[in-house]
Amino acid sequence: MTHPFLDLAPLSAARFASIEDRVARLLGTGQDVVITQGEALLPLEGAIRATAGPGTTALNVITGPYGQTFGDWLRDCGATVVDLAVPFHTAVHAEQVREAFEAHPEIDFVSLVHAEAATGNTNPVAEIGEVVRERGALFYLDAVASVGAEPVLPDAWGVDLCVIGAQKAMGGPAGVSAVSVSARAWARMAANPRAPRRSYLSLLDWKERWIDGGRKALLHAPAQLEMLALEACLERIEASGLETVTARHASAAAAARAGALAMGGGLEPYVHQAREAAPVATTLRAPAETVASELVARALETDPALPLAAGGGALAKEMIRVNHYGPDASVATVRRCLAALGTALAERGLPVDTEAADRAAQGAVSRQQDQQHLIQG
């Protein structure tokens, strides 16, 4: 008895290369794209270890937990690290990056997270990229959460290492990821004696044995299920149109923010400014007299399929995440989340108005669509 998930024909090098080409088209990049066989932490760590070492001075931007992780990796590589940390309810701005360069002109590497799904903020990469280009530093970007939810344009923004994962806004699998690599980044790796070689973390192995060989022979047996799922995910985005997919995420985010503001009861957006809020997920600050994780648990009792989660670690008490990405990037899903949260808040005696929240969510989407029609018209 055959099974569609088990009895798979081997994935050819040509098909693997064709999926890489589709990722490149998604990113609008002419850089080399390497698909890595693992969750996005694999290329995120591999890219830092390949390009950073004792001679590196890195500006590490921290707008959430992943920025903190990158700083740890950079220090472990022997790099000198200048941390630029901002409160998690906001974004970093290009002027802050410029000031960091002025204070530390030796900076030659910049690490940044585009959108932090864990904290719900997004950073202005295009403007930051201009500053980084002016200074000639290597630009490393984590676009795992943002790709598919908002524009990700490594070439236009001067990004040398752009890492993506399929598991959030792209609506794909978690076990496969990719990185676009500029010629400058390849040169930095080749000159770095500490860059991983003959290692699962090694990007250089992929360049030397895969790309430089004309993409004819794979380094190892590919993860077939994940590769086929990634291919299907890319096909779905191409069929819908990337602009349509990003518009769905923007609508869901607008609905979540407006609905939370109208709900009352002390619920409010965690990210203060709408322009700094990520389309991939909306974070909410729970009322002071409540515990976010308890509210989420109660909301999930009413509907276990809702894409709700409490913040991680210390944020579990105060932060609620509405993860409206991938298949959940819909206004209908957001409205269900708001209704469930409203019920949980009302049970604690808080004065909430779920009907007003629902009307506000729908109204926000209508206004956004009207604005989009004006732009297109």
Image (tube, helix red, strand yellow):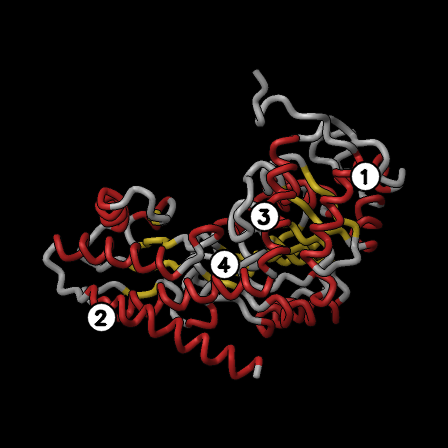
Neighbours of disc 1 within 10 Å: few (<14), some (14-19), many (20+):
few
Foreground of the two, 260 or 65: 260
Please tell me in which quadrant of the rendered image residue 114 appears. bottom right
Q: Earlier in the sequence, mark 3 or mark 2?
A: 3
The residue that disc 4 covers is 63
Circles 2 and 4, Cβ within 8 Å, touching? The answer is no
Foreground of the two, 361 or 65: 361
Q: CA distance from mark 1 to mark 3?
A: 20 Å
- Which quarter shows the N terminus? top right
Q: CA distance from mark 2 to mark 1?
A: 60 Å
Q: Secondary structure at mark 4?
A: loop
Q: Position of residue 79 (x, y in %)?
A: 68, 48
Please tell me in which quadrant of the rendered image residue 245 appears. bottom right
Q: Position of residue 344 (x, y in %)?
A: 19, 52
The residue that disc 2 covers is 356
Q: Earlier in the sequence, mark 2 or mark 4?
A: 4
Q: Earlier in the sequence, mark 1 or mark 3?
A: 3
The residue that disc 3 covers is 70
Neighbours of disc 3 within 10 Å: few (<14), some (14-19), many (20+):
many
Instruction: Tell me which residue sits at (57%, 57%) in the image.
Output: 148
Instruction: Tell me which residue sits at (64%, 37%) in the image.
Output: 228
Q: CA distance from mark 2 to mark 4?
A: 32 Å
Q: Position of residue 190 (x, y in %)?
A: 84, 44
- Residue furthest to the front in view is 1
Viewer can see residue 83: no
Q: Amino acid at mark 1?
A: Pro
Q: Amino acid at mark 4?
A: Thr
Q: Is residue 7 above or below residue 271?
A: above
